[in-house]
Image (tube, rainbow, N blue to C red):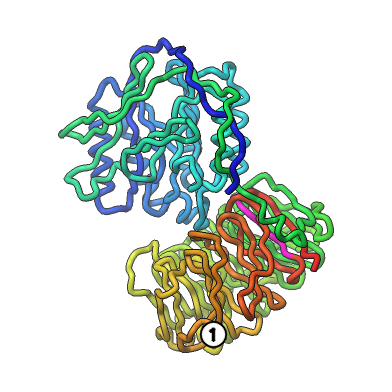
Amino acid sequence: MKKNLVFILLISSITFSQSSFRFAVLSDIHIGYPTAEEDLRISVNDINSFNDIDFTIISGDITAIGSLEELSLAKSILDELEKPYYIIPGNHDCKWSESGSTDFRKLWGNDRFIFEYGKYLFIGLHQGPRMRMADGFWAPEDMRWLDSVLAALPDSNQPLFFVTHYPLDEGIANWYEVLDRLKNFNTQLTLLGHGHRNRIYDFESIPGIMCRTNLRGSEDSGGYTIAEIKTDTIFFFEHIPDKQTIFWHQLPLVQRNYEAFVQELVRPDYSVNELYPEVKELWSFNTGFTIGSSAAIYKNSVICGDASGKVYSLSIDNGDINWTFQTGGPIYSTPDISNDQLVLGSSDSSIYCLDADDGSLLWKYKTYAAVLGCPIIKDEIVYIGGSDRTFRAFNINFGNVLWEFNDLNGFVETKPVIYDDKILFGAWDENFYCLDKKSGELIWKWKGDRRGVLYSPAVCWPVTNDDVVFFAAPDRTLNALDINSGKTLWRTGEFEVRETIGISEDKKTLFIRTMNDTLLALPASRELEKNLWLKDAGFGYDISSAQIVEIDGNVLYPAKTGELYALKSETGEILWIHKLSSGYINTVTPLSSKKIVTTGFDGMIKLIGIEK
């Protein structure tokens, strides 16, 4: 990180004349957890018992995994509040969402809010991350919305409360984008959740208040926060229904202005790019929306979808648009292309086949839920899983279903792998599946020994060699299964992996990223052997779900903080590092070791070139 000179907040003595009012703050409700429903019903009934609580703010993590069932139950309970409530999602509602984070907006009408009460303006905005394991990230589409809201304020001195889920620090990859905006206005404080406990923060002089979870945890009952504004002060109380109300913090409500007082603050550091000047960004294209999928290459084109539902075909030569195609929902499905036919899924519940030359629609198949899985095409057959808990095979020429496997208990988001007459993939139901690719019949399924949906081997793109399938899982294990029987050949937690793996082009070497600094190589064999090399790459704690790619003897991995690493496959020697962004970069798409296409949460599609 780099330190920059910025303005510090100076507080004047001007106060606001404002009549008293009170509001409740519910956070980290987590419907889906054992006591969550009961805890929420108790809190809602308790809030309704107060005549002087004027509204309720709900600051994220409404559910455990963002399923429609959980969200619908939460809404049915929250709708029992007799006074208005204002709600945003949290990371649990976005990362594991079977709908591609669209059900929240469908149920509540929006995933942001803005309202006035008295002289105060309340703005609510979440930070994801959307569908990918990563730090939080302020989406480019949300930044445009926030800019429009702030620009429309008739009075920049209006006192402002900002509500989000994560703390406004480096847990959000581009945290500074919101902080820098808020410091241009009379921001009184930020309200947040995520940490499940009461805590006071200082975000570059903007006060931060973390509110407790609504869950009871190890206590007898849950609780929530009551905030009370009296003239020029806000008071915070922890309230336990039918038990106690405990005062724990207060803040003055005063005119806050930024003046020229110099302070050193941390900002993302791009100086590593100066160490490797041979790495150039040949061109970049800004879609303006979150990109949560990788690009595909067709002839002289780069093709990728974004969270607006638009598919772009760009010229490899200069990034100019060849054509676009609009789907009905955010795209998190990495396309696959065979001949001139391009296939991908959309959260609008459809699978699309487009002409890769001009973007015209060849066929479209409507499923019963979002399609977040990545297709794979083999011998004119498309294989793809969806959120309707069904895995399908299609004739690519006509779009007719050849077979369906509908015995899944969770959605599919991974890219499957084909090995001989079998197709293999994980799902968000704790299981890893092997199907007959001709008939769709189940050959075997495998479940690890650590229970819980969040430990499902559902994200990693599995790789194969010598009748073995390899994958990493969120339970921090690396797994090798016999493809014919489903038997566990080896399973290890030695390396503390998560969801990232890769394999060499000759299929002989596995490439692994640990969760702390290191990349390593292992023989892709039926027995767990000693690592071939281990490299401390210095990227720190990393939970990114991007996969590792090898091409022309180079290993390519994008770290969660936006640096793309290139290592020599044989030795692990770092060849170069290039920082592309402050946040998540998807699995990269190399044309060669000298030209690499990247996409990221910042909405950018880039072509990277290496001069030597």
State the residue in front, 251 or 506: 251
Identify whether 68 is placed above or below 529. above
The residue depicted at 57 percent of the width and 69 percent of the height is 415
| Residue 88 pos. (x, y %) | 45, 39
State the residue in front, 61 or 421: 61
The residue depicted at 38 percent of the width and 34 percent of the height is 209
Q: Quadrant of residue 244?
A: top left
State the residue in front, 399 or 115: 115
Magenta residues, dominant SS class: strand
- Dot 1: within a 10 Å radius of its alpha carbon, few (fewer than 14), some, or many (20 or more) residues? some
Asked if residue 351 can be seen in this view, the reply is no
Identify whether 297 is placed above or below 468. above
Asked if residue 116 can be seen in this view, the reply is yes
Magenta part of the protein: which range? 596-601
Report the side of 70 relative to 124 (left or right): left
- Element at label 1: strand
Report the number of numbered marks: 1
Q: Quarter holding the C terminus?
A: bottom right
State the residue in front, 456 or 368: 456
Q: Residue furthest right?
A: 317
